[in-house]
């Protein structure tokens, strides 16, 4: 992390922490403080959560070194794709990525490109060596704290879709995300019966590998 980025992220976190402390004080005007927080940190972003399908089972079967190998290969293959689509990788936690994009269409196209890169990589490999990706996407107003984290209803929904609901090769999106990507060529959407908490609707994206 560069010095400038560290200062920026640290200053944001410090400011938010002070405002939250003010909000906790007896008699605090929470509405006014909330408005200040949103004024300072509220931004519109597309957010992507990724997960690797069957990862916990494979770790149990093949051990921690296999875990590290798969993580390293996922980063090597996918980070360049994220950068090509103007995504900002905020976090890598275990087998999951948290990425944000200013342009929601680029977020969706990036997801498809990631799946295609992995399909080519996985061809001919043993099942235990394949990198199988699940993706969840959301879009909307959220709190961005420097380059450290994002918070909001769409963040939570995208996390649930990518980490809990999507299976290998699947890309799931919130209703807000679909609205901004409905006309993307070569991609259609099937509505899910039960959207995750935080969004009114969710969809499975249909695309060609």
Image (tube, rainbow, N blue to C red):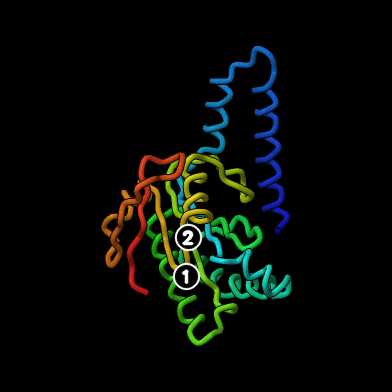
| Closer to us: 168 or 108 | 168
Q: Is residue 95 left or right of residue 3?
A: left
**In the figure, residue 55 lies in which quadrant?**
bottom right
Residue holding disc 1:
114
Q: CA distance from mark 1 to mark 2?
A: 10 Å
Mark 1 vs 2: CB contact within 8 A: yes
Residue under the point 41% across and 56% down = 172
| Closer to us: 166 or 155 | 166
**Which residue extends farthest bottom?**
124
Residue under the point 58% across and 20% down = 30
**Neighbours of disc 2 within 10 Å: few (<14), some (14-19), many (20+):** many
**In the figure, residue 90 lies in which quadrant?**
bottom right
Q: Which label was assigned to residue 135?
A: 2
Residue mark closest to the camera, 1 vs 2: 2
| Closer to us: 200 or 112 | 200
Element at label 1: helix
Q: Is residue 208 left or right of residue 123?
A: left
Q: Earlier in the sequence, mark 1 or mark 2?
A: 1
Element at label 2: strand
Residue under the point 56% across and 66% down = 54
Q: Position of residue 157 (x, y in %)?
A: 47, 46
Q: Is residue 184 left or right of residue 165?
A: left
- Quadrant location of the N terminus? bottom right
Instruction: Examine the rendered structure and indicate whether residue 117 appears above or below residue 181.
Output: below
Q: Position of residue 27 (x, y in %)?
A: 65, 12
Q: Position of residue 155 (x, y in %)?
A: 51, 46
């Amino acid at each position: 992390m560069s010095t400038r980025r560290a200062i920026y992220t640290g200053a944001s976190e410090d400011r938010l922490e002070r405002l939250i402390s003010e909000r906790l004080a007896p008699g605090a005007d929470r509405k006014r403080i909330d408005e200040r927080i949103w004024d300072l940190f509220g931004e519109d972003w597309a957010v992507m959560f990724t997960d690797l399908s069957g990862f916990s089972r494979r770790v149990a079967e093949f051990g921690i070194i296999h875990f590290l190998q798969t993580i390293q290969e996922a980063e090597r293959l996918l980070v360049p794709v994220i950068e090509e689509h103007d995504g900002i990788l905020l976090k890598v936690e275990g087998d999951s990525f948290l990425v944000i994009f200013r342009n929601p269409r680029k977020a969706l196209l990036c997801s498809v490109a990631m799946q295609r890169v992995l399909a080519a990589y996985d061809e001919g490999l043993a099942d235990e060596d394949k990198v199988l990706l699940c993706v969840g996407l959301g879009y909307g107003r959220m709190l961005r704290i420097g380059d450290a984290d994002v918070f909001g209803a769409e963040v939570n929904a995208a996390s649930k879709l990518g980490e809990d609901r999507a299976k290998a090769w699947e890309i799931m999106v919130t209703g807000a995300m679909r609205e901004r990507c409905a006309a993307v060529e070569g991609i259609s959407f099937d509505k899910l019966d039960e959207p995750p908490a935080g969004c009114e609707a969710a969809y499975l994206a249909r695309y060609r590998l």
